[in-house]
Image: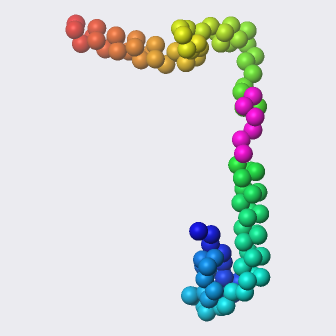
């Protein structure tokens, strides 16, 4: 349900209300239509601002030769890159180290 503001007291009121409960101002149809058009225009502008840029625009280009080479390595059926495998490998190594220290 849309909410418009009373022109007199600036409190929020429903689109379906004719009289403001706060100050008693009677809302005309023209004023309600004008505010609804402004609200729709504001929502449209907000949706344009919130739209995301193209997918390629957010990617940082790899500048170093080694980074380019590492990014081309893919592992397994899902083509997981080396960058996605670094953290799980570190976690597995830490578990192995902790297990070895516990059994000593």
Left or right: residue 19 compared with residue 88: right
Q: In the image, is 61 to the left or to the right of 79?
A: right
Q: For this rendering, which residue is in front, 94 or 9? A: 9
Quadrant position of residue 33: bottom right
Q: Is residue 1 at least partly visible in the picture?
A: yes
Pick whichever, 93 or 45, lies toward us.
45
**Left or right: 99 as drawn, with respect to 86:** left
Q: Position of residue 77 (x, y in %)?
A: 54, 10
Display colour scheme: rainbow
Residue 86 among magenta residues: no
Residue found farthest to the left: 103
- The x and y percentages for residue 51 are 72, 45
Considering the image in quadrants, where does the C terminus appear? top left
With respect to residue 6, does 75 lie above or below? above
Give the image quarter of residue 84.
top right
Which residue is painted at 57% across and 88% down in the image? Answer: 22
Residue extending farthest to the bottom is: 24
Residues 49 and 83: in front is 49
> What stretch of residues is rendered in magenta?
51-56
Q: Is residue 66 visible?
A: no
Where, quadrant-wise, is the N terminus in this rendering? bottom right
Q: Between residues 59 and 76, which one lies in front from this camera angle?
A: 76
Residue 74 place in picture, x, y as percent: 60, 9
The residue under the point 34% across, 10% down is 96
Q: Residue at x 70, y 49 (%)?
A: 50
Magenta stretch: dominant secondary structure = loop
- Position of 23 relative to 102 (above/below): below
Please count the marks in the image: 0
């Amino acid at each position: 349900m849309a909410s418009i503001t009373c022109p007199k007291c600036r409190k929020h009121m429903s689109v379906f209300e004719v009289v403001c409960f706060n100050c008693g101002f009677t809302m005309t149809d023209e004023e309600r239509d004008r505010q609804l058009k402004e609200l729709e225009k504001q929502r449209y502008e907000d949706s344009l601002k919130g739209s995301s840029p193209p997918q390629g625009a957010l990617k940082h280009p790899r500048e170093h030769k080694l980074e380019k080479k590492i990014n081309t390595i893919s592992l397994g059926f899902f083509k997981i890159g080396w960058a996605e495998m670094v953290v799980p490998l570190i976690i597995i190594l830490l578990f192995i180290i902790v297990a070895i220290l516990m059994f000593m």
